[in-house]
Image (tube, helix red, strand yellow):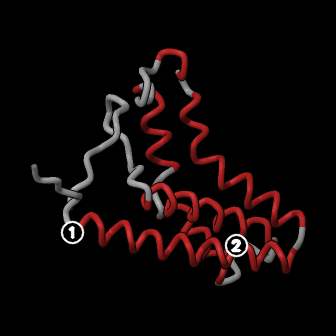
Amino acid sequence: MSVTGPPAGQVAKRVAWAALATFLLAFLVLEVINHGFPALAAAVLFLIVPDLPVLIGASTAAHGKLAPKAVPYYNLAHRPWIPLAVLLTYSVGVLGDWVPLFTAALGWLTHIALDRTFAYGLRSPDGSRRLQAG
């Protein structure tokens, strides 16, 4: 009997996401220590917020699937470009100096990196998990 694991490319991607998640989490902790409760509140909130679209149509969704009407919102909340754009725009000073905005974006990107580390990617139009290419 032969047991096979995920392709090497998949493993490498997940390790890279894990490294990013570790860095982001460490940076997030540093920012919260330096800036206190408002930064903590924003970070914790945005570690959770990307999964709120799961609640859309939750009563009609099958186990392990999202309701199809929730998929676009879930996928949008799990794209790394949005929090990355907020981080970059904040870093160049365009968004002011309100630190909770920065820690919210860090928390959001950390959530995405953790999801990708554990192979929770975007969803298919029917609400099922997409198969990850190697």
Upstream in the sequence, badge 1 or badge 2? 1
Give me the residue at 43% from left, 38% from top: 72
Tag 1 residue: 8
Q: Is residue 31 above or below residue 64?
A: below
Task: Please name whichever residue, 128 or 63, is drawn nearer the observer in this view of the structure.
Answer: 63
Amino acid carrying mark 2 in the image: Leu
Circle 1: element type = helix
Tag 2 residue: 28
Is residue 108 toward the left or the right of residue 101 in the image? Answer: left
Q: Residue 133 in the image: x percent, y percent?
A: 21, 56
Give me the residue at 10% from left, 49% from top: 1
Give me the residue at 89% from left, 71% from top: 36
Is residue 23 toward the left or the right of residue 7 in the image? Answer: right
Is residue 53 toward the left or the right of residue 104 in the image? Answer: left
Single out the residue that lies furthest toward the top: 60
Q: Is residue 88 above or below residue 118?
A: below
Quadrant, the C terminus: bottom left
Single out the residue that lies furthest toward the bottom: 92
> Between tags 1 and 2, which lies in front?
1
Estimate how packed mark 2 is, as few (under 14), some (14 to 19) or many (20 or more) residues with alpha carbons within 10 Å: many
Q: Is residue 1 above or below residue 10?
A: above
Amino acid carrying mark 1 in the image: Ala
Q: Residue 9 in the image: x percent, y percent?
A: 22, 68
Looking at the rendering, which quadrant does residue 64 occupy?
top left
Estimate how packed mark 1 is, as few (under 14), some (14 to 19) or many (20 or more) residues with alpha carbons within 10 Å: few
Single out the residue that lies furthest toward the left: 1
Is residue 3 toward the left or the right of residue 92 in the image? Answer: left
Q: Is residue 32 above or below residue 80?
A: below
Q: Residue 51 in the image: x percent, y percent?
A: 57, 43
Q: Residue 55 in the image: x percent, y percent?
A: 58, 29
